[in-house]
Image (cartoon, rainbow, N blue to C red):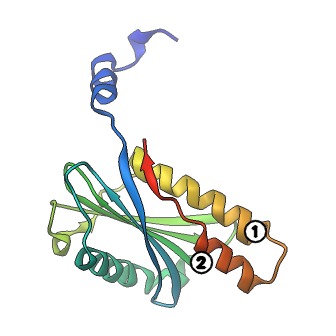
Amino acid sequence: MTTERVGQEALLALAEGHHARTVRPLGSSEAAGHAVKAYAIEAPGRTVTEQDARAALRIAADHLASARLRGSLGLSVLLLHAGGDGDYVLVHTWIEGYMSDLAVFTGPAGDLGQLRPGRSGLAPCVWEAAVLAHERDAFTRHVLDGTSSLEERLAAWHADVLEGEVR
């Protein structure tokens, strides 16, 4: 493949601006009948507060209230991304048939009350995808491939968190 077919300038600009972002677990909780494992992703100079985490959990609870109708199995991952260009909340839910459901909410930086569902087709960014990849592996390793009781598998899934920098 030649470089004539790719957006050379756009790709090089992305590469130039790419940097690590901090990921930290926000703990596990319950929302709308779902076990929710939450994370903060922080761009340089941005911080997720306790108040932000509570607001994101409310957004997740509203979305999860109808998740059983979409085949939810009751396990969800919540990402609160304080990005460089705005705030994002992603609600990832494991559903029947080894599938998942993903909702993305977007809005201006620092005002989670203004988050709205993202446009059709919007998918996780590179940093969000890194956390979701970890969670896919944790779900497979502990819940699907585990050999202990379901309670022990779920405890292991809750305990298996990603923390540090992602690129």
Query: Pointer 1: what residue?
Result: 144
Question: Does residue 66 appear to the left or right of 53 in the view shown?
Answer: right
Name the quadrant containing residue 89: bottom left
The one nearer the camera, 156 or 128, is: 156
The one nearer the camera, 116 or 113, is: 113
For label 2, the SS is loop
Q: Which amino acid does the dot numbered 1 rest on?
A: Leu
Residue at image point 51% right, 90% down: 33
Q: Where is residue 31 in the image (x, y as percent from the top left)?
A: 44, 87
Query: Pointer 2: what residue?
Result: 71
Of circles 2 and 1, which is in front? 1
Q: How far apart are labels 2 and 1 at the CA level?
A: 17 Å
Toward the bottom, the furthest residue is 33
Residue 6 visible within the image = yes
For label 1, the SS is helix
Question: Does residue 139 appear to the left or right of 52 in the view shown?
Answer: right
Name the quadrant containing residue 152: bottom right
Q: Which amino acid does the dot numbered 2 rest on?
A: Gly
Question: Does residue 116 appear to the left or right of 73 in the view shown?
Answer: left
Whether tag 2 and tag 1 are in contact, CB under 8 A, the answer is no
